[in-house]
Image (cartoon, rainbow, N blue to C red):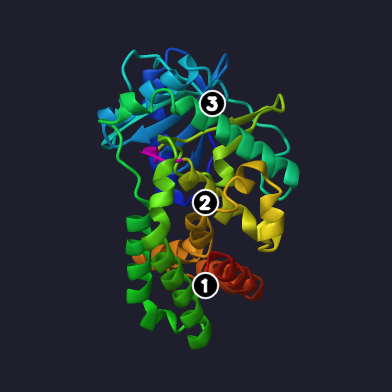
Amino acid sequence: MRVVHNANKGDDDCFDRLFSYFQSQFSQKIVEGVPIRKNVFLVKTAKQSWVLKGYQSINKLKLQEAFTATLRKEGFSKTYRFLVPPSGEPPFLNGLYFGCIEYIPPNQTGFSFRTQRNRQEGLTLLNSFHETTARFAARYQTLLSQADLYEKWIERFDIFCHHRPFLRRFIDHSLLSELVSWGNWSLEKMSSSHHLFTKEPKVILHGDVAHHNFLRAKNGELYLIDFDLIAIGPPVYDYLQYANRILFHLDWSLTNLWQHKQMKAYLSNKAFLSALAYPADIYREWNRLMREKSYTNERKVKQVIDLSLGQFFLRKKFVQQIQRLAE
């Protein structure tokens, strides 16, 4: 068995033991094992490839299995299947239950948000996902949490503000104050208009519409993957997150954002507009840096500083435009 990794000697031993365990669970000989990310592995046999993903409880694994099966039964085929483990039971190791997931061979050209074509294709796929999950969201009401973007963002804002004195080591005081003022204005406006979100029929949200959760397959088709953060809520929550992910590539231009069909539908929605001003990505990354105590890692700090300041003045004009429109 060939185990591929880029780790130190201690991690090498851990990976070797892990894949030796996986081999004991497979009837076919594993010819290669590749860690993809934490607790996710690609396992290849002579006849088949699998993705093994660890879940903290058997219930979380069963929920993912049931959800993806329901998706496909309801007509959404652009995702993976969970497969029956070779041993008949999910492998269990180090407190994790490993699900066996269909391996979808990736295209040499990966998916990103850099092009208009890709961005629109991703939105079209996300819209199809929402249309499908709307048909069975009621069946998952007791299994999934209710998404509350406003409360989530208040908490994220409060944590960011709590760390503000420490963040002055990395960001100029005046710029930091502006970042706080954007979030404060956005939340104030959302408090009086976020009821507009509830007018939409509820769906099952993906919850993490980052580019790496869209997979361009070898056959050219686009797939949606990784449903760890699914929740019940209005589709606009996913679209807001998607907008926050793509605006960097649009030079923070509302005009460019409205060129995407699904975004244009919210042009006159003041709740959507005010939410666009909220710097969700900046708060998220600084909060993560503080939570993980990674502020001594120069590379990670630089990445978050670049995110915060790299397009600061373009973003400032964007927020000012939204503030005029939302008044």
* Residue on which the image places disc 3: 79
Which residue is pictured at 60% across the width and 33% down the height?
125
Q: Which amino acid does label 3 sit on?
A: Thr
Front-lying residue, 68 or 137: 137
Residue 314 falls left or right of residue 95 = right
Q: How many marks?
A: 3
* Residue on which the image places disc 1: 298
Q: What element carries label 3?
A: loop
Q: What residue type is labelled 2?
A: Leu
Q: Residue 319: which numbered mark, if any?
A: none
Q: What residue type is labelled 1?
A: Glu
* Residue on which the image places disc 2: 240
Q: Would you say the residues marked 3 and 1 are in contact, meaning their CB atoms lie under 8 Å apart?
A: no
Which residue is pictured at 58% across the width and 52% down the height?
243
Residue 75 in the image: state x and y as whole percent: 52, 17
Q: Which residue lies furthest to the bottom in this view?
A: 173
- Indicate yes or no whether the magenta region holds residue 231: yes
Front-lying residue, 326 or 8: 326
| Mark 2 Cα-neighbour bin, 10 Å: few <14, some 14–19, many ≥20 | some
Q: How far apart are marks 3 and 1 (CA)?
A: 37 Å
Q: What stretch is highlighted in magenta?
A: 229-234
Which residue is pictured at 37% across the width and 83% down the height?
165
